[in-house]
Image (cartoon, rainbow, N blue to C red):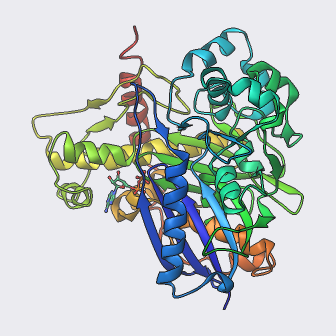
Amino acid sequence: MKYILSLDEGTTSARAIVFDSDGRPVAIAQKEFPQHFPKPGWVEHDAEEIWAAQIGVAIEALSRAKLAAKDLAAIGIANQRETTVLWDRATGTPVGPAIVWQDRRTAEHCERLRADGRTDFVRSRTGLPIDAYFSGSKIAWLLDHVPGARAKAEAGQLAFGTIDSWLAWKLTAGTAHVTDTSNASRTMLFDIHALDWDDELLRILNVPRAILPAVRSSSEVYGVATAPGLAGVPIAGIAGDQQAALFGQMCFAPGLTKNTYGTGCFMLQNVGDAPVASRNQLITTVGWTIGGRTTYALEGAVFVAGAAIQWLRDGLKIIRSAEEINALAATVPDNGGVYFVPAFTGLGAPYWDPHARGTIVGLTRGSTAGHLARAALEAIAFQSADLLNAMAADTGQPPLELRVDGGAAKSDLLMQTQADLLGIPVARPAITESTALGAAYLAGLATGVWTSTDELARQYRVEKRFEPAGSPDRAAAVHWARAIDRARDWAAP
Ligand code: ADP
């Protein structure tokens, strides 16, 4: 039996999972690391704290599996995307904080770029809207605010990386300064057609090429680990967490789509060998590159999904745990005409309205907490359906099924509601650690543990499949659209 160590470095915790060659998890370890909020809208990590947590859980997972480095065929990395680290090449020490994807400090910079009329150019090269989420403006901020950073960067003394690059550097003691195409495609500096850093974008964002990592495929040997406990193991797979999850859900063919139901939702659809430009505010991104072949994806996010359930728990206090929403919703046969748009922080694709706010409509004297619970679950399903419909509009091809994971995908009621709304089956896999599994698969493909995605696809097991009951309820969709209209523009200045 061959084993693969998968490092799943998330926004709040570092996880490590050891998989066997049947794609089954044999041991797992997880550790949270500190979040730093120095000012409103600023979110920072300490890259050294991430490294310490990540190497710690890697060793712990190995020991729980009763394995040693020599038993491992490879290491795979999946990481929180866009988060930006700048470090000194000579010492390997970060020269500033890691600026987290959620951080809004560069919103004004991005606003200026938009005002300068760069939107269409940036979108056509990178597949991205100009936004502070992506790494480009965060790099510029560090270069302009860390004393001496720009001069050192120009002189080739600094290295930039997203967290994948940082971990690969630390694992190899600075031998590998690499990233993969999926992570590069989130920087706003990367041409997703040419698959290279783009000089024009580098000029617009004032980022010197000398700091950038080499862009490699998502599945190849980047270097060999030297870190104690892992010495000698090749690092052989890298992908951003959502792309890794798409791969771990084995969405290898165009049209296959996964949705992760967490605090928010992340939906990605494989669109094949050529990028698809979105007319519905979705993001065009690299899925992965394997053996010289790049697979692209469309991506959309729901800002408030599981968070709506948390609000019923912590804000309204009508449930004590997230799981309780299911029993409460089951006290009523339907939503009783109640619709809940949880636009607490505005609406994402396909609406893109920062001024929308949370709205509950259709209340009558007979409305109960059960109706609201049902409306909250339906809201998650409706928002996800809006994304999937936007993808179908962009590709011209409605998908055949939706593959799901994440904490709220545990709700059978939510999954059945989703299937009913979409009119296609919803498949919940046996292994819902899609992100870690995807990174393991990428690493195993590069090191001979598996030979092809066809072989991997044979490992796909569905735990439960939710078949749609009849065709989608048009009246409900119309009500949802009207509820969205009520929520829109509410907080406009
Ligand atoms: P994240 O990675 O974003 O922290 P998770 O994938 O851990 O999120 O999912 C957590 C979310 O799942 C929470 O918002 C919670 O409301 C929801 N959740 C967890 N268990 C259930 C359940 N049994 N039924 C419905 N929702 C659930």
Taking depth in this image into account, of 86 and 65 the one nearest to the observer is 86
Q: Residue furthest front?
A: 91
Q: Quadrant of ligand 1?
A: bottom left
Q: Is residue 224 above or below residue 153?
A: below
Q: Where in the figure is residue 327, as x and y percent of width and height?
A: 20, 61
Q: Where in the figure is residue 493, as x and y percent of width and height?
A: 39, 7
Q: Where in the figure is residue 298, as x and y percent of width and height?
A: 68, 44
Taking depth in this image into account, of 411 and 389 the one nearest to the observer is 411
- Apparent side of residue 294 relative to residue 397 in the rendered image (left or right): right
Taking depth in this image into account, of 444 and 118 the one nearest to the observer is 444
| Residue 427 in sight here | no
- Residue at x 82%, y 35% (from the top left corner): 156
Q: Where in the figure is residue 463, as x and y percent of width and height?
A: 48, 76
- Apparent side of residue 344 relative to residue 421 in the rendered image (left or right): left
Query: Looking at the figure, which quarter contains the N terminus?
Result: bottom right
- Residue at x 34%, y 44% (from the top left corner): 307
- Residue at x 74%, y 45% (from the top left corner): 90
Q: Is residue 244 above or below residue 212?
A: below
Q: Residue furthest left?
A: 365
Q: Is residue 90 above or below residue 404?
A: above
| Residue 291 in sight here | yes
Give the quarter of the image for residue 107.
Answer: top right
Taking depth in this image into account, of 14 and 278 the one nearest to the observer is 14
Give the quarter of the image for residue 142.
Answer: top right
Give the quarter of the image for residue 361.
Answer: top left
